[in-house]
């Protein structure tokens, strides 16, 4: 029986060697060829009482064909979404009292891992006591997190849409300068312990080998800055539009009618927006956690690049330069107008002085003649 198997293997080898290898791709021809040879050699294989060493199914899986794997990949979108932790970033006020918020939520506060005081992280578990169980301590993805920033941003992790308002109400109780229109952005994070690298980017989400509280702080800091930057860009856009309207009016009438107080208000608004972005939001203050460990630095740099933080600040700075140029021009116009007024006042005073002098001369000359 072993001889029949040897003859079968020899015939297959001769058949393969007789075909030109350049006319077929290895990924495309292995499966059909094995199947045809198996049908031709059916009589040889049935003579053996032992299973044939030639396995059609093994060759199918070893062929390396992308089509074979694709056929078994049902529901690719569902598999991709499985395990994702939704992230929701909000900018809802211009200032948040973190100390008061921390005092009211001590049982949920995550101990800080850096000296930064512009944010706090709160952790909420599903246990009725509010204290995470052992399983919840081991798995960050089983809990809900909220990272709140002093400048007005709040980033929610693993919170359902129906529960968002209840979490934001916690923030609103300690917020000042609430916005009439809240800004929102969505993102997602996925944990894959078997990932070969520390992180991998995807469309609207990031995959991490390990998701911990430091990763949550890093992601929250970039998303919080990004959504705050959106707000300040919108404020500067309003300034640009206002100055554009002033310029159009000057083009039509040839005059400038703005009051000095209004101009100073615009100057203060432009300067405060720039100061808030740089100082309060800390757009260029690198995270202390990212300084300490390279894997957190990778996440930090990737997200800043993904959200184009530096480029967007460059656009904001360009618009502020346009506003600054207009302010300088209008200040010169108002200064020239004031100088003209002073000149006319001086001319008027000189005229009065001359009239009085002439009057005195005439009166003296008249009195002397009498």
Image: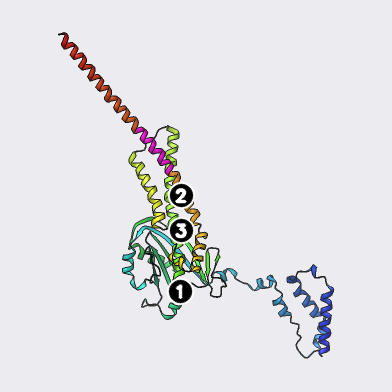
- Image location (x, y in percent) of residue 139: 46, 76
Neighbours of disc 3 within 10 Å: few (<14), some (14-19), many (20+):
many
* Image position of 132 with respect to 152: above or below: below
Q: Is residue 162 magenta?
A: no
Which of pointers 2 and 3 lies earlier in the amino acid sequence?
3
Which of pointers 1 and 3 lies earlier in the amino acid sequence?
1
Q: Quadrant of residue 18?
A: bottom right
Q: CA distance from mark 2 to mark 1?
A: 38 Å
Q: Nearer the viewer, mark 2 or mark 1?
A: 2
Which of pointers 2 and 1 lies earlier in the amino acid sequence?
1
Residue placed most toward the observer, 184 or 309: 309
Callout 3 secondary element: helix
Q: Which quarter of the image is occupied by the C terminus? A: top left
Q: CA distance from mark 1 to mark 3?
A: 24 Å
- Image location (x, y in percent) of residue 261: 33, 41
Residue 140 is labelled as: 1
Residue 211 is labelled as: none
Q: Which residue is at 83% across, 76% downward?
A: 15
* Image position of 225 with respect to 317: above or below: below
Residue named by callout 2: 317
Residue named by callout 3: 226
- Image location (x, y in percent) of residue 257: 37, 35
* Image position of 117 with respect to 131: above or below: above
Residue 160 can be seen, yes or no: no
Q: Is residue 330 magenta?
A: yes
- Image location (x, y in percent) of residue 314: 48, 51
């Amino acid at each position: 029986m072993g001889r029949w198997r040897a003859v079968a293997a020899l015939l297959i080898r001769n058949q393969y060697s007789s075909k030109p290898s350049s006319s077929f791709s290895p990924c495309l021809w292995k499966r059909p060829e094995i199947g045809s040879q198996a049908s031709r050699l059916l009589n040889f294989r049935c003579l053996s009482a032992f299973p044939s060493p030639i396995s059609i199914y093994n060759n199918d899986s070893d062929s390396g064909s992308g089509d074979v794997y694709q056929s078994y990949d049902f529901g690719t979108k569902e598999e991709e979404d499985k395990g994702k932790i939704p992230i929701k970033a909000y900018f809802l006020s211009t200032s948040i009292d973190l100390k008061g918020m921390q005092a009211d939520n001590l049982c949920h506060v995550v101990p800080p891992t850096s000296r930064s005081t512009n944010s706090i992280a709160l952790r909420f578990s599903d246990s009725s006591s509010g204290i995470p169980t052992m399983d919840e301590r081991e798995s960050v993805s089983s809990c809900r997190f909220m990272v709140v920033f002093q400048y007005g941003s709040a980033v929610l992790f693993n919170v359902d849409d129906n529960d968002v308002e209840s979490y934001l109400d916690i923030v609103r109780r300690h917020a000042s300068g609430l916005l009439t229109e809240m800004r929102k952005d969505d993102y997602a994070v996925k944990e894959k312990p078997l990932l070969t690298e520390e992180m991998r980017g995807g469309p609207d989400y990031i995959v991490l080998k390990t998701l911990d509280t430091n990763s949550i702080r890093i992601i929250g800091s970039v998303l919080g800055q990004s959504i705050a930057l959106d707000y300040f860009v919108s404020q500067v856009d309003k300034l640009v539009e206002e100055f554009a309207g002033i310029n159009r009016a000057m083009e039509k009438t040839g005059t400038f009618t703005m009051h000095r107080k209004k101009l100073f208000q615009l100057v203060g608004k432009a300067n405060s927006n720039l100061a808030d972005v740089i100082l309060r939001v800390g757009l260029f203050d690198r995270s202390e956690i990212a300084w300490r460990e390279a894997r957190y630095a990778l996440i930090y740099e990737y997200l800043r690049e993904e959200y184009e933080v530096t480029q967007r600040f460059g656009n904001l700075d360009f618009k502020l330069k346009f506003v600054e140029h207009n302010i300088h021009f209008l200040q010169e116009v108002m200064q020239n107008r004031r100088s003209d007024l002073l000149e006319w006042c001086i001319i008027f005073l000189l005229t009065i002085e001359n009239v009085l002098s002439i009057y005195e001369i005439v009166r003296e000359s008249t009195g002397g003649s009498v």
